[in-house]
Image: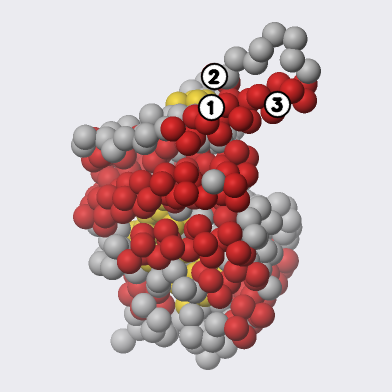
Amino acid sequence: MPNNSRETVLNVLRGQKGDHVPNFSGMGSITLGGIQDLGYRFNEIHGDARKMANSAASTHRLFGFESAIVPFDMGVVAESLGAGMKYYDKADLGQIIYPTMTRKLVDRSTVTVPDGASEADAKTFVMKEIERQITEYELKMPADIASTGRIPVVLEAIRILKRELGDEVAVGSWTLGPFTELGQVMDLEVLLKMSAKKPEAVNRHLKFMVEYLDKVLNLHIDSGADFVTVREMGATSSIMSPRMFKSLVLPNLQELFGRLKRVPTVLHICGDTNPIIELMAQTGASALSVDQMNRLNETRAKLSNVVLLGNYKPFGAPFCDGTPEEVEAIIKQSLDQGADGVWPGCDIWPQVPPENMQAMIAAMKKHGSNSH
């Protein structure tokens, strides 16, 4: 008997073969058409559990996409720790403006530069002051994480999806990884410099993030998430050396994935991940997700027994701006290069034309049976 979408996705994440290569994601995969069909504005779907769940389900209901994923923006965890967010409540009906961070816990805007300082001196002063603040800062665990910020919205959205869609498709959720999440609440540029100069100060905060993300993701799992994705894009090779990744990021990812054993897990890092792909495979994640900058055929050759997900570019050309024929070509390329699951290299840009979503689904039906 053929697997349904949910069974196929979960089998692949566990390293088993389904009857087809699944077409899914563990990251944002909503479309503007789906949101507008529901009568929602984009800014409304980030703080209302019912609207979040309906929006996440719409991509499956409209196109046959094989997962439903929440949340949609990168601020949920940082906000729960006290960072400030803006939601663009006055955005026009068709505008796609994601919530953005307005204030970090350690933020340059709070630093007062001495009068008369030159531009260069002012920057040096600010960087040193932020470094001091990061070194001394004490991150605090909320008393009741499940009721903090928008975390309860995400948990309820997962419960709704599980109840209404959970027999058909895999329900997933995600957070940023420890290093990337730390960059959301503190100054990423200074953190990167401190990672080389004062790794012990950065690692102290990373250990807190492992503890916190473990609790948040296990709340997601308790609410019904079939799989969870950790997005550590702040540690990609264009930003951080493989040596620093190995010494600072890898041990904390290993600790986090070691605590998330109840469901399959995915590690996503975008950019050119070929220099660190073998280190990524040591994290303990069930599967690895890469984007279009990863040379997937090389990765497949290096990691013959690792579950690889990727790696079409989900914005710009050709996925959003090209023809259905061009979309078919990039989907076929991911399959030909060895993807175990075809999924986007990042969030699907919501303004993707419906005909290109349909072309992707058609390409999967044409090329994605496991006889390909």
Residue for point 36% across, 77% down = 14
Q: Quick check: 107 left or right of 82?
A: right
Return the x and y of residue 12 as percentages of the image width and height: 41, 77
| Dot 2 crowding, Cα within 10 Å, few <14, some 14–19, many 20+ | few
> For the residues marked 2 and 1, what is the alpha-carbon distance in whole angstroms?
6 Å
* Mark 2, secondary structure of its residue: helix
Residue for point 75% across, 9% down = 116
Disc 1 marks a residue whose amino acid type is: Asp
Is the C-beta separation of discs 2 and 1 under 8 Å? yes
- List the residue tagged with mark 1: 107
> For the residues marked 1 and 3, what is the alpha-carbon distance in whole angstroms?
14 Å
Q: Residue furthest top?
A: 115
Disc 3 marks a residue whose amino acid type is: Lys
The disc label shown at residue 123, or none: 3
- List the residue tagged with mark 2: 110
Residue for point 64% across, 75% down = 296
Dot 1 or dot 3, earlier in sequence? 1
The mark lying in front, picked from 3 and 2, is 3
> For the residues marked 3 and 2, what is the alpha-carbon distance in whole angstroms?
13 Å
**In the figure, 49 relative to 345: above or below?**
above
**In the figure, 123 relative to 46: above or below?**
above
Disc 2 marks a residue whose amino acid type is: Thr
* Mark 3, secondary structure of its residue: helix
Number of numbered labels in the structure image: 3
Q: Quick check: 243 left or right of 72?
A: right
The quarter holding residue 237 reads bottom right
Return the x and y of residue 176 as percentages of the image width and height: 46, 50
| Residue 101 can be seen in this image | no
